[in-house]
Image (cartoon, helix red, strand yellow):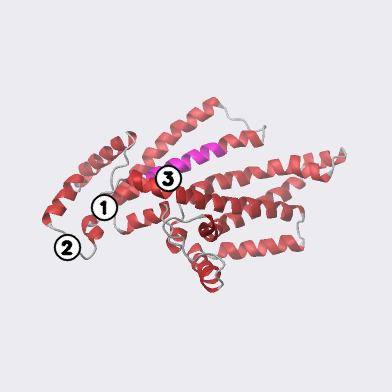
Amino acid sequence: MFRFIVRRLLQMVLAFFGTTLIVYALMFAGQGDPIQALAGERPVTAAQRAYLTEKYHLDATGVGGFFYRYFDYISNLLRGDLGESLTGRSIGDILAAAWPVTIRLALIAIAVAVIFGVTAGVLAGIRRASIFDNATLLLTLLVLGIPTIVLAPLAQYFLGVKWQLFPPTAGADPDFFALLLPGIVLGSLSLATALRLTRTSVAENLRADYVRTARSKGLPNRRVVSVHVLRNSLIPVITFLGVEVGNLMSGAIITEGVFNIPGVGFNLFRGIRTEDGPLVVGIVSVLVVVYLVSNLVVDILYAVLDPRIRYE
C-alpha cells in the first residue's frame, strides 16, 4: 500500500503540472485583450495599459513568451503565491472568501446525495421490480434528463419566488437555509446517479454466491444485507462520490450563478467572462489539487471496504 501511495503521489505531480500547462495554454491562446475586457466599455489610458502589461507580462508573445509566463507563474505557485487577478486583488484572498461558501454548498449537496440517494438505492435494490423501484427509476431518469441550467431556474422560480419556501437568492453572506435550495439542486444529479449505482450494485450482490452461503448458514436477512451486501455494494458508489466531490467543490458555475452565491464557481465564471487569466488559472490549479486528493482518498478506501483489493 505504501508503494502504491508513493506512486500515486508521483502521478499526481505529473497530472498537476500537465493540467496547469494545458489550462494556461488555453487561456494564453484564446486571450484577446484582457485589459479592455476587464474595463468593459470604459476607455483605458495608455499609462494604465502599460502598467498592467508590464505587471502581468502581457507583452511576452510567442512560444518563448508563453513558457516564460508559465514558469514564472509556477515558480510563484510553488512558493504558495497564487498571484493577483487583473483587478489587483489577491487570488488567495478571493479563494479564502469563496471557499467557505462553496464548502458549505458542497456538503449540503453530498449529504443530499448520500442520505437520499444511497438509502433509496439500497431499498430499490432489495425490492427490485417493485412499485418503489420503478418509481425511483422513473424519477431519476427525469432528473438526469433535465440539465442544471434548466433545473436551477425552475427551482428558484417555483420554490423561491412563487411558493416562497426558500430564499430565491443566497446573497453575500449566505446561511444554511439560504444554501439549502441550491444545495439540493446541485446534489440532485449526484443523488440520481448514486441511487442508480447503489440499486444496481445491491441487486447484483444479492445474487452472489457469498450471499446464498450466508443465508444457508441461517444468518438473518438484515445482517446479510447490512454486513455483507452493503459493504461490497458501496465500492462503485464511493468511487462516484469521490470523483463527484471535485465537481461539487468547484462550486458548479451554473448553480452559483443562478442563486447569486459568491463561491468558487461564481468567481471562476467571472474570470472567464472578463478574460482574467491569472484568476482562472489560479482557481483551476487549486481545483486540480482537490480532484487529485479526492481520487487518492477513494483509492485508499477501496482496501478498507474490500480486503480482497490489494495494491502492489
Residue 268, image x and y in percent? 37, 53
Residue 203 against residue 305 in the figure, above or below: below
- Residue in the image at 76% along x and 52% along y: 126
Element type at marker 1? loop
Type of amino acid under label 1:
Thr
Viewer-nearest of labels 3 and 1?
Answer: 1
The image shows residue 52 at horizontal and vertical percentages of 19, 50
Choose mark 3 or mark 2, whichever is in front: 2
Q: Main secondary structure of the magenta part?
A: helix
Can see residue 103?
yes
The residue sitting at 41% across, 34% down in the picture is: 13
Q: Is residue 271 above or below residue 131?
A: above
Tell me what residue is drawn at x 64 percent, y 51 percent: 115
Circle 2: is it few (<14), some (14-19), or many (20+) Cα within 10 Å?
A: few
Q: Of the residues shown, which amino acid type is indicated by label 3?
A: Leu
Determine the residue positioned at 76% across, 64% down: 131
Q: Is residue 101 left or right of 230 when viewed as pictured?
A: left
Tell me the residue that label 3 is attached to: 287
Residue located beneath label 1 in the image: 87
Callout 2 amino acid: Pro
Question: For residue 43, which numbered disc appears in the image?
Answer: 2
Quarter of the picture containing the C terminus is top right
Instruction: Choose the circle earlier in sequence order: 3 or 2.
Output: 2
Callout 2 secondary element: loop
Residue range corresponding to the magenta coloring: 285-298
Q: Nearer the viewer, residue 9 or 270?
A: 270
Q: Determine the residue located farthest toward the bottom in the rendered image.
A: 162
